[in-house]
Amino acid sequence: LAELPGEVARRLRTEFRAADGTPIPVTLELIVATVGRTRLIYAVATDRRAEEATERANREHLEDLTELLGTVRDLASPEADRVARERLCEAALRLSGAAMVLLYEPSADGLALVPTAQAGRRLPEMAVPLRGEPTGTAHAYRTGQPLLVSDFTTDQRISPRLVALSGM
């Protein structure tokens, strides 16, 4: 670059090596200019490790969401069966890091939500009435708002009957 006439500006991605030989990805910004009779080279190297870790995490997250979307599409198909529902729960369990995931769907008579699949810790099957007994599950179904519970045993939105059945 120093041999090129006039002013030159370049941005390069390359690797430096730490003293122990560990590669360090960097963005190297170079400016070459002539000031009077002197050729000056100005260089700035920026460590890209954090940026690359973020990009990697974003790619992994996108892969997870793509997998979950595929599972949701499987569930929405006319051929949806218990296996598709279990795959959905397993994907949600993996993505959320939760101890358990339960999938509730309306019963045939439409009066309750019934578990159709679960992953992680297993609970006895229990229908959740859509009217009468106040539950977070029924509320989430009626409003379309997600229900995320950090402590199943103390969350007031969870039916005491379900907590008792869980043995937790």
Image: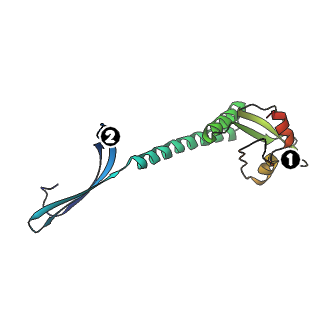
Q: Which amino acid does label 2 sit on?
A: Pro
Secondary structure beneath label 2: strand
Q: Which amino acid does label 1 sit on?
A: Leu
Measuring 77% from the left and 54% from the top, which residue is drawn there? 143
Rendered position, 47 above or below 153: below
In this view, the residue farthest toward the left is 37
> What is the x, y in percent for residue 43?
24, 56
Q: Compute the Cα span from label 2 to label 1.
A: 58 Å
Q: State the mark number for residue 130.
A: 1
Residue 82: quarter of image: top right
Residue 113: quarter of image: top right
Of residues 12 and 84, the one nearer the viewer is 12
> What is the x, y in percent for residue 92?
65, 39
> What is the x, y in percent for residue 94?
61, 37
Quadrant where the C terminus is found in the figure: top right
Secondary structure beneath label 1: loop
- Mark 2 highlights which residue? 23
Task: Answer few, some or many: residues within 10 Å of disc 2's Cα (few below 14, many 20 plus, some between 14 and 19).
Answer: few
Q: Can residue 81 be seen in this view?
A: no
Question: In this figure, which colouring scheme has been used for the structure?
Answer: rainbow
Task: Answer few, some or many: residues within 10 Å of disc 1's Cα (few below 14, many 20 plus, some between 14 and 19).
Answer: some
> What is the x, y in percent for residue 27?
32, 51
Quadrant where the N terminus is found in the figure: bottom left
For this view, does 100 lie left or right of residue 45?
right
**Disc with the residue nearer the chain's start (2 vs 1):** 2
